[in-house]
Structures are given as C-alpha cells and as structure tokens.
Amino acid sequence: MRFFCAQEGIEAKRKLNSLKKEFFRKTIHLCTAFVPLLLHFCKMPAVCLVAAAGVFYVVSESLRIRGREIPVISDITAAAARKRDENKFVLGPVTLVGGIVLAALLWNEKAAAIGIFALAFGDGLASLAGKTFGTVRIPLTQGKTAAGSLTCFFAIFCATWFVSGDSFLSLVVACVGAFVEVLPLKDFDNLLIPVVLGGIAHFVV
C-alpha cells in the first residue's frame, strides 16, 4: 500500500513539474504577441532584433551542449526544456524565431500579425489547455488532446477576427491552424503556423 502511495506521489510530482515547464515555455510563446506591435512602428529593426535574438540563442545553446553554459540563457533553456529535449539542442526557440521572421518578411502587416498571433495564442494556449484539462486524446497525434485543439481553434479565431474583423477569414484560418497544430510536428509547428496562416490571410486581407 505504501509503495503504491509513493508511486502516486512521484507521478503527481512529475505531472506538476511538467505543467510548470509547459507554463514557462508557453509564456515565452505568449510574449511573441508583442512582435506585431514592434513591426508596426519599426519593421526592419524589429525583424533584425528578433533574428539577432535567434542567432544569440543558437550560439548559447551550442555552447551549453558543449558544457559551457551562458548565464541566464542556459538557465531559461533548462527550465523550459521538455523531457524529449534533455541533453539535446533545444530546437523550439529557433523555429519560433524562424516562423516569426519569415511571416514578417513574406506577408503584409495584417497577415503577419495574424500568423504571429496564431502562434502566440493558438499554439501557446493549446498546449496549456491540453496539459491542464486534456483527457480525450486524438489518435495518431503523439498525445495531442481535444481540449488543446479546441482551445487552439478558438484562440486563433478570436485573434484573426481582432486583426481583420472578417468572420469568414477567421473561421478558415482557425480551422487550418487547429489542423496544423494537431499534427505531430514537434517544434516545427512554430515555423508552419505563422507562415501558413499568415499566407492565407495575406491573399485575403
């Protein structure tokens, strides 16, 4: 009996630790929602700043893998790393920066904002909802949940409507966004969501 109680306690601690990491990681996602504001006032300096942050991260993460940690940056990476990323190069921030930069360079201002907001709120909140409330898992998605997908859909719909005021566009973008998010792409959804959804918006807005 004590053994099973101990096992349950260990499992509960693991889940809590996983949720804390997910919350911390997705807080970074949510912070990218400020990027469209920067793009509005100073597009190229903002793009260069985001790209420079990405390059700095790649250098610091490469050094961390070699045992030479960069204060603060390496600590943030370790705090946000998933179990699958332990002792590996954490790719998420690279694809995050890549998706934002590509959306900003490829699409018009409104379309880029839609793509970046979809990444910030859709992908960010989906994972939190899935970890917190997800009990119904979607087959062949490597653990994605119905709660996460529904949250992603509504978050993208609201964000797109906020930018465009177009209900039909919001519905289309939200449907495509929820589909992309549910695919087992690991960190590459950070790249596809802003580029694909921004592209859809670019040719409609």
Image (cartoon, rainbow, N blue to C red):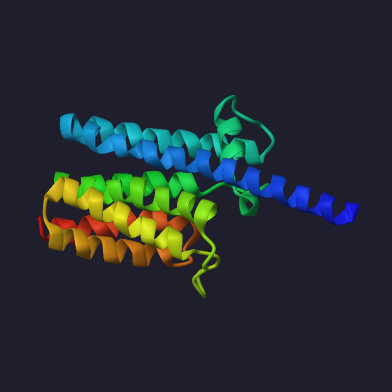
Q: Residue furthest top?
A: 71
Q: Is residue 190 left or right of residue 135?
A: left
Query: Residue drawn 41% across and 48% down?
Result: 124
Counting from the top left corner in percent of width and height, residue 148 is at 44, 58
Q: Nearer the viewer, residue 87 or 13?
A: 13
Q: Residue furthest bottom?
A: 139
Counting from the top left corner in percent of width and height, residue 42 is at 19, 30
Q: Is residue 121 above or below residue 152?
A: above
Query: Residue drawn 12% across and 60% down?
Result: 203
Q: Is residue 106 visible?
A: no
Q: Is residue 29 left or right of residue 200?
A: right
Q: Is residue 150 above or below residue 119?
A: below
Query: Residue drawn 77% across and 48% down?
Result: 10
Q: Nearer the viewer, residue 73 or 148?
A: 148
- Which quadrant of the figure contains the N terminus? bottom right
Query: Residue drawn 35% across and 39% down?
Result: 32
Q: Is residue 114 above or below residue 20?
A: below
- Which quadrant of the figure contains the C terminus? bottom left
Counting from the top left corner in percent of width and height, residue 161 is at 17, 51
- Dividing the picture into quadrants, the one containing residue 80 is top right
Q: Nearer the viewer, residue 7 or 39?
A: 7
Q: Is residue 9 left or right of residue 152?
A: right
- Dividing the picture into quadrants, the one containing residue 36 is top left
Q: Is residue 133 visible?
A: yes
Counting from the top left corner in percent of width and height, residue 88 is at 63, 49
